Amino acid sequence: MKHLIRDLLVNSIWFSTVARRYASRHRQHGPLVRILCLHDVQDRDWFSNLVANIKSKYHIISPSDFHNRKFNPDKINILLTFDDGYQSWIDVVLPILDEHNIKVLFFISSGLLDIADDKVEVEKFMKQNLCIKPRQPLTWEGVDTLVASGHTIGGHTVNHKDLTTLSLADLSREINDDKTAFSTKLNIELSDFAYPFGTKRHFNDQVRQQAKTAGYSYIYSAIAGFVADTNTDIPRLLLENRQSISQVNKWIEGAYDVFCMLKS
């Protein structure tokens, strides 16, 4: 019921043209850039339709394009990102990305990779740290496959904790040890970091500073919005599995941003 009411309000915002005026104001400051965030993707047909829709209506950019600000001034630029670490990225997501020659950004918690072969520990991690029902995790071999396919890996801490609840020492370990793990195991240096959970209450000045101190150049939240000219607390729009394509388009074009602003 809660989501039904939300979607009705988003539709009302969309049909009132408020969202289009909101997007037009942002366009005055430069090209529109929207970063989408997904997690576990198990529905192949839904994801295939989503990618085809985004590719036809908008301009898909790679992580490299985003870093170098190579944007299309006439369309909404879309960067796809994925959080946590799931086997579905190999089984479902990767073949579709390859089909469309799309490069994306995967934010991965290294602690989940370390226990991927231990079903009991994975179940505990997913229930306690990710707050989800258990499902098959990604492995270090899977990450290697993603990298070999040309995709970019980002840091997401070791254990996906609420970073605002940690001591400074634990916070530093969560961020730095995660970054070091990818450097040690796969010989890749990470420049992108996403806060676990990513809402306003899940990061603060101390968390932000620790990510910068660790050497991250781009730091992402999970707060809806068009991207502004900043490399910190970069907004991302969290999509829901099996969300209707028409609703996704309304969200991309600004209706959900306006809804969030009115609700806050």
Image: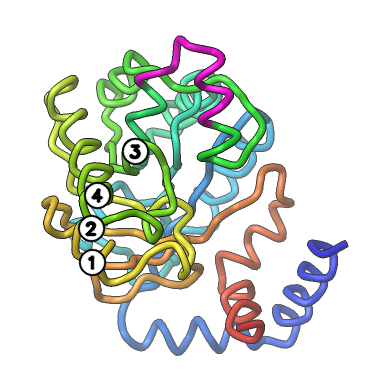
Asked which secondary structure carries label 1, the reply is loop
Q: Earlier in the sequence, mark 2 or mark 3?
A: 3
Q: Earlier in the sequence, mark 2 or mark 4?
A: 4
Q: Which residues are magenta?
A: 114-125
Distance from disc 2 to disc 3, alpha carbons, whole Å, reads 17 Å
Residue ID for mark 2: 218
* Picture coordinates of residue 52, whole percent (x, y): 57, 42
Q: Is residue 166 above or below residue 73?
A: above
Q: Is residue 87 above or below residue 104?
A: above
Q: Which quadrant of the rendered structure holds the C terminus?
A: bottom right
The amino acid type found where label 3 is placed reads: Lys
Q: Report if residue 218 lies within the magenta region.
A: no
Is 47 or 240 nearer to us in this picture?
Answer: 240
Q: Is 202 placed left or right of 180 in the picture?
A: right
Q: Earlier in the sequence, mark 1 or mark 2?
A: 2
Distance from disc 1 to disc 2, alpha carbons, whole Å, reads 5 Å
Residues under numbered marks 1 and 2 in contact, where contact means CB atoms less than 8 Å apart: yes
Residues under numbered marks 2 and 3 in contact, where contact means CB atoms less than 8 Å apart: no
Residue ID for mark 3: 103
Residue ID for mark 1: 231
The amino acid type found where label 1 is placed reads: Asn
* Picture coordinates of residue 75, whole percent (x, y): 43, 67
Mark 1 packing: few (<14 Cα in 10 Å), some, or many (20+)? some
Residue at 37% of width from left, 35% of height from top? 109
Q: Earlier in the sequence, mark 1 or mark 4?
A: 4
Is 122 or 63 nearer to us in this picture?
Answer: 122
Residue ID for mark 4: 192
Q: Earlier in the sequence, mark 3 or mark 1?
A: 3
Q: Quadrant of residue 204?
A: bottom left
